[in-house]
Amino acid sequence: MSGSARLRDSPRSGLIAAALCVLATAAVLITAPAVHSALRSGASGRQPLAPRLAALSDQELAQLLPKQSEFPASWTVDETTELSDTFGYFKYHVFDEGLGFDPIVCFGVVGVASTGAFDAAQVFGHDPAAQVAVADGKDILLTVGREFDRSGFDAFVGLVSRCLRFGSAVAGSYTVRILEDSRPTAGPQRFRYSLTTTISAEPADETRTDYYSYGRTSGLILTGSAGSGHQQALDALFDITLQRIVER
């Protein structure tokens, strides 16, 4: 296997990034047949439609995410807040678009499957010294969303558990390693896994590993992802954020 520095300069390294980019755009069509404001007006003022912390506004939820000072000093950090204060549902429609996932249901394991949440805000950081380039420059991404489907998180965990090995005509083969699946009686439900992508190359195969973290508590779902070499930074930022949500 080649090192990460060699992977970045390889003419085939862009194939993985391109596949992920296509998957996140053309291959997945998201519809929103029912989306409601998280707050409604009534005789006694604005009343929450969503339960627990899901009733917070998008701006309030954005404040739970990591701040610039919590990322490494050299990183570029940006955030996106929906500011629509929505609480509803959407549905994924699977279109292969020539990506050739086998089995096709495993396409969602590449960071796009629904966890039963509607995203409200996200923050992402770019590491200028990253040895493995990512398609969108988001070396670490954290998103907080309102949970609208209480069965969605467990369904997602089940999907990943059934897709420990699968393939793609575009990016090669994928191997999943489940790092954590905790369900405490008191405290957030957590799920973490790594996804190693292997593409055949000469003189040796090339690989990259991405990391995904999920937490479920108080009517919210926190999602985190990181590229190769950034697992420890993701774990630290994720733990800080999840604790902030628990203490809210």
Image (tube, grey):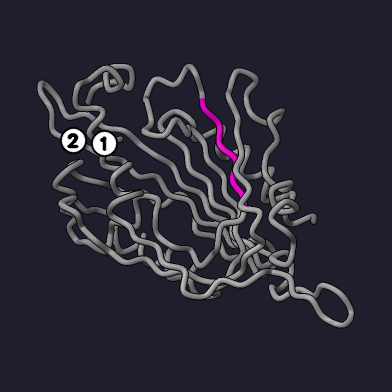
Which amino acid, mark 1? Ile
Stretch of the chain drawn in magenta: 121-126
Disc assigned to residue 16: 1
Q: Nearer the viewer, residue 175 or 96?
A: 96
Left/right of residue 174 with respect to residue 216 in the rendered view: left
Instruction: Tell me the CA gap for discs 1 and 2.
Output: 8 Å
- Give the quarter of the figure containing the N terminus: top left
* Quadrant of res 221: bottom right
Count of numbered labels shown in the rendering: 2
Q: Circles 1 and 2: CB distance less than 8 Å?
A: yes
Q: Nearer the viewer, residue 185 or 9?
A: 9
Taking the spot 39% from the left edge, 39% from the top edge, the residue there is 210
Q: Secondary structure at mark 1?
A: helix
| Predominant SS along the magenta part | strand
> Is disc 1 surrounded by few (<14), some (14 to 19) or many (20+) residues within 10 Å?
many
Which amino acid, mark 2? Ile
The residue that disc 2 covers is 199
- Give the quarter of the figure containing the C terminus: bottom right
* Quadrant of res 43: bottom right
Left/right of residue 95 with respect to residue 39 in the rendered view: left
Q: Position of residue 136 (x, y in %)?
A: 41, 34
Q: Nearer the viewer, residue 17 or 28?
A: 28
Q: Position of residue 247 (x, y in %)?
A: 79, 55
Q: Is 146 located above or below residue 131 in the figure?
A: below
Q: Secondary structure at mark 2?
A: strand
Q: Nearer the viewer, mark 1 or mark 2?
A: 1
